[in-house]
Image (tube, rainbow, N blue to C red):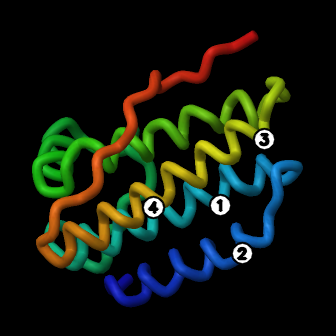
Amino acid sequence: MTPERHHEKAERFERSLALCGDADHEARIEGAMLAASHWINFALHALALAPPEKDFQHPYFLTDDERSTYDQALGPELLRAYDEIEDLRPFYVRGADADGATAGRRAIALLGLIRDGALAKSTGARPPAIESRPRTPARP
């Protein structure tokens, strides 16, 4: 897929996410993950790090060399933010942990950081810093 198409899809997901409230935390987490993957692919293709026919899907599918290359090019904070969104899924989408609203808001915040970082990297600007948090949410 072309960088432009990834950009369009990411924006469409974000418009849909804007319609979700705190009670829709599962949709926020899943939607943030999908939009984030499009933003990352947008940057990877714009920087010619991946051909249009090879899309990033999940960090755990990456080889160590790919992860290292992407971290160096995009900054490790973008994939760490994506990892954090992925880490929310077992507890708040497939599971039923308490305070899903907070997890959903965190996913949206991480998506914003990924979007801003991908846009900045694709234009050569410095991406924003990502607030450090533990990768796995604390379980009650």
Splitting the image into 4 quarters, where does residue 119 fall?
Answer: bottom left
* Residue 81 relative to residue 10: left or right: left
Type of the residue with mark 2? Ser
| x 83%, y 25%: residue | 98
Tell me: 137 left or right of 53.
Answer: right
SS class of the residue under badge 4?
helix
The three-letter amino acid code for the residue at tag 4 is Ser
Q: CA distance from mark 3 to mark 2?
A: 17 Å
User: From the viewer's perspective, is the residue at label 2 or at label 4 nearer?
Assistant: 2
Circles 2 and 1: CB atoms closer than 8 Å: yes
Kindly identify which residue carries mark 2.
16
Amino acid carrying label 1: it is: Gly
Query: Mark 3 against mark 4, which lies toward the viewer?
Result: 3
Tell me the kind of residue under disc 3.
Ala
Residue 104 drawn at (x, y percent): 70, 45
Q: Which residue is mark 4?
A: 37
Residue closer to the observer: 105 or 1: 105
Label ID, residue 31: 1
**Occupied quadrant, residue 65:** top left
What whole-number distance in Å separates the C-alpha atoms at marks 2 and 4?
16 Å
Tell me residue 34's x, y (percent). Answer: 56, 62
First in sequence: mark 3 vs mark 2 = 2
